[in-house]
């Protein structure tokens, strides 16, 4: 029996009673047992539910703690963002007092943040902007706007004002009534300053555009959009409305002076301007009264928001064309006069030379015909006068040739030592006649053979030596030839001709190279001469691409310095020993592999014979196109490139080789083979990318030296 039931029965029933009620008690006992079982089940359920509730409570506490940390972190980040944002975030109550301001308030205005909260907003607004603020607030209260955007000036702690942009909206309470304002305030003072500067600049350029004396015009799609007053004046237009909106064709003749239709040419020059970014050209326009006038047009394409326009500057050429026409006429007359003068001088010089030759010849014959002593003296005077006159005629003839541009310099090889000896041979005797010392000094470093115009160079040095002896009465005359350096195949020389003669006054030094001019008016009377000698000398040195300078002191002497740059002759270069069979020293070029681009069979045959003797292998290309292909197919140490070939000439072939991508094509020596003088083709040869040249007919020594020079 259930313990609880048994305890109660013992307390209230006797054993007899228990026996009598045994069946009833058993039923009750069963109920107790069932109840106890239910209680245990409920306890188990409560225990399980209690554990689940405990677990759920712990999870909830954990989540609450995590969310709290997340909220705290987010709040910290938001606070940091708000504190560091460059715009002022504000709240104000409906009475206009600041309720909240972030730190940007202090950055922008300079006022303390906490001291400003609680103060009236209008204390910080420019007096002229207060009404605008009130008007904008009324719009919000009357529901005319949901959000306000406007610009006002806020005072700063320094007393100055800053332009700010405000964005604000109403704060609505639970009762639906407005309780205040919130929004942003952005500092736009820098933008305002830039806008003001931009407006000032725009106004300044507008004034420049309008008031400029240069005619300016703005065109879009051949239509006049705008212009200044100078432009209206240029076209003779009184009313702007008669010009703006018109087209280029309305103020242009049908055809331009070159024969092109104005409409076609306009499209062409506009296209060029857009391609190059600028175009300048001459154009014929028509004034409002129908008269034509020339202008210089400068087209400048400009990209604007509204599309492409052309900014045009116009310059009236009427006066310039008139002056040009007059100058052309004056130039033609001057050229005719110069030509007539040169022709006259040339004719007269030649005409005078004929009887002068007769005079000199007869004088020479008479002097050999055993004349008496008094006759010989007269003949010597006659001969000296005739020689001086002939020198004068030669000077005039040379000067006329130089002025007419008919002097052409030769380019020939000459022996420099023989050249100096020939010049100086006659001067020793002339100097001796005046009891002067004539000294010649030649720098041994000067190559023995040079290339140039020895005749004209001799004329320069002879003229200077003659003058030196003529203007020196005692002392000496010195001719020095100095080596001043060399580069590649050229040498720099300086000739110094100095004397101890009468000298040149400092204020006359600039005049001595002028035509028909001498340092002193007494010079002609005392020493003779025309004053053409130094003028001719200066011109000849200039033709040689040299320069001439003078140093002098009156009464002490003069020194002339002539600097020239001459080519070193092949005869002065190191010789290679040559026999009928072979060059005896050709180790440096032995084994070279050369491409010969040449279409002439005879030239090919000659080059092949030389290359075979020197153990140089070769390939032949009959034109530049084949040469270009072969260079890409095989490695060569050098290309011998003829300049005149069919299909593709040597210039184009060299340029195309240099354009190939591999670096070796930039380095490979390309030697031009030409029959022309180097001075005539140098710019074109070098410009096309070639390295050097050899001349035709091919000199084996020259070809060998080129191979040796570029062997590595």
Image: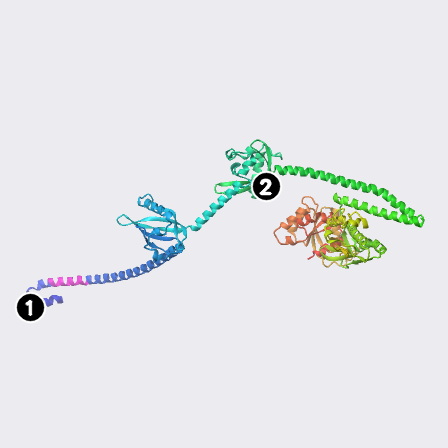
Residue placed furthest toward the top? 290
Above or below for 17 versus 116: below
Which residue corresponds to the image point at 88% horizontal and 48% vertical from the top-left? 381
Looking at the rendered structure, which numbered label has been put on residue 15?
Answer: 1
Looking at the rendered structure, which numbered label has been put on residue 83?
Answer: none
List x then y, in percent, for residue 575.
77, 57
- Answer with left or right where residue 613 lies relative to residue 61: right
Q: Name the foreground residue: 141 vs 326.
A: 326
- Answer with left or right where residue 10 lies relative to residue 335: left
Q: Give the class, few, some or many, for how many residues have Cα within 10 Å of label 1's Cα (few <14, many ≥20).
A: few
- The quadrant of the rendering that contains the N terminus is bottom left
Q: Name the foreground residue: 373 vs 349.
A: 373
List x then y, in percent, for residue 586.
74, 58
Task: For marks 2 and 1, give the one nearer the viewer.
Answer: 2
Above or below for 156 versus 33: above
| Residue 308 drawn in magenta | no
Q: Earlier in the sequence, mark 2 or mark 1?
A: 1
Which residue corresponds to the image point at 61% horizontal and 38% vertical from the top-left? 317
List x then y, in percent, for residue 237.
54, 34
Q: Secondary structure at mark 1?
A: helix
- The quadrant of the rendering that contains the C terminus is bottom right
List x then y, in percent, for residue 535.
75, 48
Q: Which residues are magenta?
A: 27-41
Q: Secondary structure at mark 2?
A: strand
Q: Name which quarter of the figure residue 473 lies in.
A: bottom right
Q: Name the foreground residue: 262 vs 643.
A: 262
Q: Which residue is mark 2?
A: 280
Q: Name which quarter of the figure residue 72 lies in.
A: bottom left
| Residue 38 drawn in magenta | yes
- Answer with left or right where residue 691 lies relative to residue 64: right
Q: Give the class, few, some or many, for how many residues have Cα within 10 Å of label 2's Cα (few <14, many ≥20).
A: some
Q: Report whether residue 249 is seen.
A: no
């Amino acid at each position: 029996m259930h313990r609880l039931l048994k305890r109660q029965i013992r307390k209230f029933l006797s054993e007899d009673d228990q026996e009598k009620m045994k069946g009833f008690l058993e039923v009750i006992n069963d109920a107790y047992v069932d109840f106890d079982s239910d209680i245990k089940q409920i306890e188990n359920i409560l225990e399980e539910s209690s554990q689940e509730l405990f677990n759920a409570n712990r999870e909830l506490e954990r989540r609450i703690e995590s969310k709290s940390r997340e909220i705290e972190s987010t709040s910290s980040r938001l606070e940091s963002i708000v504190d560091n944002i460059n715009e002022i975030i504000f709240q104000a109550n409906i009475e206009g007092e600041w309720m909240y301001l972030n730190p940007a308030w202090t950055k922008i205005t300079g006022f303390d943040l906490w001291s400003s909260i609680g103060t009236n907003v209008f204390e910080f607004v420019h007096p002229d902007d207060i009404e605008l603020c009130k008007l904008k607030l009324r719009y919000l209260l009357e529901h005319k706007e949901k959000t306000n955007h406007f610009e006002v000036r806020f005072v700063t702690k320094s007393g100055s004002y800053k332009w700010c942009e405000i964005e604000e909206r109403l704060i609505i309470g639970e009762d639906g009534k407005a309780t205040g304002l919130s929004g942003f305030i952005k500092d736009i003072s820098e933008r305002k300053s830039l806008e003001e500067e931009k407006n000032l600049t725009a106004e300044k350029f507008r004034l420049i555009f309008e008031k400029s004396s240069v005619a300016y015009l703005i065109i879009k799609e051949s239509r006049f959009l705008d212009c200044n007053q100078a432009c209206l004046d240029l076209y003779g237009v009184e009313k702007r409305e008669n010009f703006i909106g018109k087209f280029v064709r309305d103020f242009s003749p049908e055809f331009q002076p070159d024969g092109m239709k104005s409409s076609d040419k306009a499209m062409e020059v506009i296209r060029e301007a857009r391609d190059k970014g600028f175009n300048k050209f001459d154009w014929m326009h028509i004034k409002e009264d129908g008269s034509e006038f020339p202008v210089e047009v400068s087209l400048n394409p400009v990209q604007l928001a509204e599309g492409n326009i052309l900014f045009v500057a116009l310059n009236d050429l009427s006066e310039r064309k008139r002056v040009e026409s007059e100058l052309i006429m004056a130039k033609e007359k001057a050229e005719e006069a110069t030509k007539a003068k040169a022709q006259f001088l040339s004719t007269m010089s030649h005409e005078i030379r004929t009887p002068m030759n007769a005079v000199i010849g007869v004088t020479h014959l008479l002097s050999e015909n055993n004349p008496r002593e008094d006759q010989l003296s007269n003949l010597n005077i006659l001969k000296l006068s005739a020689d001086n006159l002939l020198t004068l005629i030669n000077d005039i003839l040379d000067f006329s040739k130089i002025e007419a541009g008919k002097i052409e310099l030769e380019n020939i090889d000459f022996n420099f030592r023989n050249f100096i000896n020939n010049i100086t041979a006659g001067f020793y005797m002339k100097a001796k006649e005046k009891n002067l010392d004539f000294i010649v000094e030649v720098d041994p470093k000067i190559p023995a053979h040079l290339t140039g115009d020895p005749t004209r160079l001799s004329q320069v040095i002879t003229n200077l030596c003659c003058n030196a002896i003529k203007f020196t009465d005692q002392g000496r005359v010195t001719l020095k030839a100095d080596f001043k350096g060399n580069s590649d195949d050229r040498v720099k020389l300086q000739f110094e001709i100095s004397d101890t003669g009468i000298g040149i006054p400092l204020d006359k030094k600039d005049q001595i190279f002028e035509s028909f001019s001498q340092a002193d008016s007494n010079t002609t009377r005392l020493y003779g001469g025309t004053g053409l000698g130094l003028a001719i000398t200066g011109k000849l040195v200039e033709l040689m691409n040299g320069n001439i300078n003078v140093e002098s002191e009156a009464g002490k002497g003069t020194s002339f310095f002539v600097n020239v740059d001459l080519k070193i002759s092949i005869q002065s270069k190191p010789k290679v020993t040559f026999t009928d069979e072979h060059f005896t020293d050709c180790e440096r070029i032995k084994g070279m592999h050369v491409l010969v681009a040449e279409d002439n069979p005879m030239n090919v045959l000659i080059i092949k014979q030389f290359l075979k003797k020197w153990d140089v292998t070769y390939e032949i290309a009959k034109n530049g196109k084949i040469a270009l292909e072969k260079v890409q197919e095989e490695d060569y140490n050098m290309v011998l490139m003829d300049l005149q070939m069919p299909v593709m000439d040597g210039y184009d072939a060299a340029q195309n080789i240099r354009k190939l991508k591999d670096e070796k094509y930039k380095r490979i020596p390309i030697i031009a083979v030409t029959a022309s003088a180097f001075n005539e083709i140098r710019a074109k040869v070098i410009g096309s990318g070639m390295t050097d040249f050899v001349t035709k007919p091919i000199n084996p020594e020259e070809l060998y030296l080129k191979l040796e020079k570029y062997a590595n």
